[in-house]
Amino acid sequence: MSTFQAPKGTYDLTPPRSATFLAVREAIAAPLRDSGYGYIETPGFENVELFARGVGESTDIVTKEMYTLTTKGGDQLALRPEGTASVLRAALEANLHKAGNLPVKLWYSGSYYRYERPQAGRYRHFSQVGAEAIGTEDPVLDAELIILADQAYRSLGLRQFRILLNSLGDKECRPVYREALQTFLRDLDLDEETRRRIEINPLRVLDDKRADVQKQLTDAPKLRDYLCDACKAYHEEVRALLTAAGVVYEDDEKLVRGLDYYTRTTFEFVHDGLGSQSAVGGGGRYDGLSEMIGGPELPSVGWALGVDRTVLALEAEGIELDLPYATSVYAVPLGEEARRVLFGVVTGLRRAGIAADFAFGGRGLKGAMKSANRSGARYALVAGERDLAEGVVQLKDMESGEQSAVPLTEVAAELAKRLG
Ligand code: ATP
Ligand code: MG
């Protein structure tokens, strides 16, 4: 160990577990790429105001969780706590919405930073893959995104997740509900901070995780009873499309989520094997966000899935991914001449797209075969002076233990055939 350790609330991704992280990112990205979403990458930090306005002044993210800094030049920056505000900022800046091709469909993958109390599944540096469909109000888009996240989780083999769905109304009906809710909440027995929240963002009080608060909320007015006809129809359409696609969801009236910018459709993916950090991903429609950050009216919808918690969910379900990164062939040379020849074979295999590795450092047969085992390789190639004199290498099947001599000139073809 060195004198240093990873900062509190962070951890390093190291082999072999890191391969699972890559595979999870890829599994989430694949359905998006296949559905017309283009890759976008934005800086790891932004002007702090983007998040203050875009995520919302009353959210935990902005009030408690942002890493902010002042540069030597005096700029106020924040490490990005989430992706949506940055992606929308970048799309507007690049005028993607003006190309006459709405919606602008984008996906991203990266690190996010929140100053939280670290615990299992909750870190100060974590990883998300997200998707945004910008500029179109169409229930098919909301449904598409939920279906693609469901597809991603299923492709990983996850089964114990649930989709929670709600509608938060729009600028017509939400204010009426907001007032009714405020009137109800003001009569409850709540602490000072929560009372302040009632005035700034009362819907978020519904999101309070504390049991004594939840108990008092049983008779709170329900947003469902206040939705305007347009919002109701929109929500029914989203639900019908999900059902038609065979995606199972649960209506959850209390689902409001932590960000201010959501309107209408809102959803969360929860996994039942994760204890209190059960949300593996979430998202929704954010029709007002563009205007909040100084852009034109661009109704949009998106989600972000947490890579860290998805990996924890895989572990909770005991799922081991079939990782494509594993070494297929491990070469063990015995002697100087064999080193040169086998390294040539390995290079050839790699160029032919076969994952191959090599016993470096001139080690003995026993130690090298141990490494071959540990690499998970399906085949080992062993060659000593006598083999080379005969123009062959020994090809060993690491599963059955069977070994046969294969002419040097035919090794690549033989392995390609065996590995399919
Ligand atoms: P939570 O209610 O657990 O705090 P959140 O609503 O703040 O979650 P979002 O902002 O919606 O989370 O982010 C989407 C996903 O990113 C979450 O569902 C989760 O998987 C992941 N995520 C968020 N914060 C963290 C964190 N601190 N550590 C690890 N993953 C996180
Ligand atoms: Mg949070």
Image: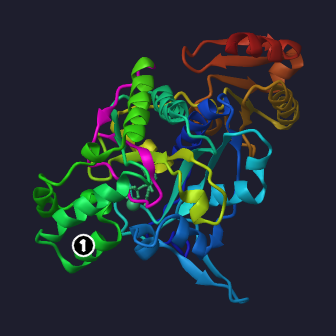
Q: Is residue 169 visible?
A: yes
Query: Residue 22 occupies which quadrant of the picture?
Result: top right
Position of the C terminus, as image quadrant, is top right
Q: Nearer the viewer, residue 328 or 334?
A: 328
Q: Residue at x 12, y 52 (%)?
A: 218
| Above or below for 251 versus 306 | above
| Above or below for 59 versus 356 | below
Q: Is residue 86 left or right of residue 392?
A: left
Q: Is residue 15 visible?
A: no
Q: Is residue 414 left or right of residue 231?
A: right
Residue 303, percent across and down? 51, 45
Q: Nearer the viewer, residue 170 or 95?
A: 170
Label 1: state its secondary structure: helix
Residue 217, percent across and down? 15, 57
Residue 170, percent across and down? 43, 50
Ligand number 2: quarter of image? bottom left
Q: Is residue 325 left or right of residue 344?
A: left
Q: Which residues are magenta?
A: 245-271
Residue 282, percent across and down? 43, 46
Q: Which color scheme did the rendering employ for the protein?
A: rainbow
Q: Nearer the viewer, residue 92 or 229?
A: 229
Residue type at mark 1?
A: Thr
For mark 1, what is the residue? 194
Q: Is residue 380 left or right of residue 189?
A: right
Q: Residue at x 56, y 73 (%)?
A: 2
Query: Residue 374 occupies which quadrant of the picture?
Result: top right
Q: Nearer the viewer, residue 331 or 229?
A: 229
Judge: label 1 CB < 8 Å from ligand 1. no
Q: Residue at x 28, y 77 (%)?
A: 196
Q: Residue at x 50, y 26 (%)?
A: 155
